Image: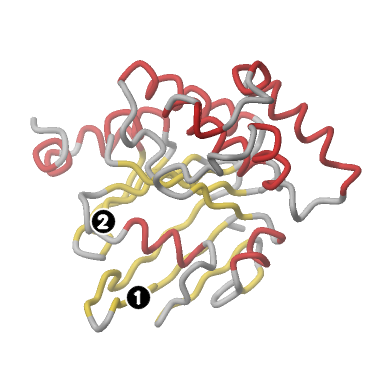
Amino acid sequence: MSALEVSGLAFAYDGALAVRDVSLAVQPGEIVALLGANGAGKSTTVRMIAGVLNPQKGAIRFGGQAMTGVPSHHVVRRGITLVPEGRLVFPQMTVMENLQLGAHVKQRGEVGALVEQAFTLFPRLAERRSQLAGSMSGGEQQMLAIARGLMAEPKLIILDEPSLGLMPIVTQEVFRLIEAVNKRGISVLLVEQNLHQALRIAHRGYVLEKGSVVLAGTGEELLANDYVRKAFLGH
């Protein structure tokens, strides 16, 4: 059974179709990349999966349960968290306070252990636990955003453009951390414009164009695909 099954999703903003007919799956323990240019429908797709937007057509199932139209706070409780584009940490709150907010669906007695797990995976955050999030670098804020998403103990974490605006050396560190998260048994749906980095770590990927899936395959297959190389990698 797929961890996540999405079929025929469609969504329009004020009559303008952003997603036309998107179907995809994420198997347990996989990293799946969702790729495409700006405006291809990637963020709209993951917002529907996360319950932020209600699909106008199509169906979402997770762990065998129907998820179509389930509000976002219930989606989190069922095991899916979204780390949105732009990091969106709470800048006037400390690292510790941001992490504690990420555990809002957990019992109070569980929070301390979850924080320590986050600090083990992200030791730089442990060093900055009392620092205001807004005073940290972009890479550190991205680490905090991912760590906050993990505080709900998701089975699937959705990362929307985690490398956006980061320097190449920081981007490499973020992708290394994504692999480390996945090795803990957490499935990852990764939205990225950095196709080379995303497909290097992804088990499989889907390429969106104008709101529809135009290609699907393993990471290696998509990296070797002439269309992908010409359209996205400049080869």
> In the rendered image, which quarter is residue 124 located in?
top right
- Give the left or right position of residue 142, taking residue 149 as reference: left
Q: Position of residue 194 (x, y in %)?
A: 28, 35
* Near-viewer residue (29 or 196): 196
Residue wearing tag 1: 10
Q: Is residue 127 above or below residue 28?
A: above
Q: Quadrant of the N terminus?
A: bottom right
- Tell me which residue sits at (55%, 49%) in the image: 27
- Tell me which residue sits at (48%, 22%) in the image: 176
Q: Position of residue 74 (x, y in %)?
A: 68, 67
**Marks 1 and 2, the one that precedes in the sequence:** 1
SS for dot 1: strand
Q: Position of residue 161 (x, y in %)?
A: 37, 42
Indicate the amino acid at tag 2. Leu
Circle 1 residues within 10 Å: few <14, some 14–19, many ≥20 = many
SS for dot 2: strand
- Give the left or right position of residue 75, taking residue 19 as reference: right
Q: Is residue 15 above or below residue 226?
A: below
Q: Is residue 84 above or below residue 173?
A: below
* Near-viewer residue (21 or 54): 54
Separation of disc 1 and disc 2 at Cα? Answer: 13 Å
Q: Is residue 17 above or below residue 108?
A: below
Residue wearing tag 2: 208
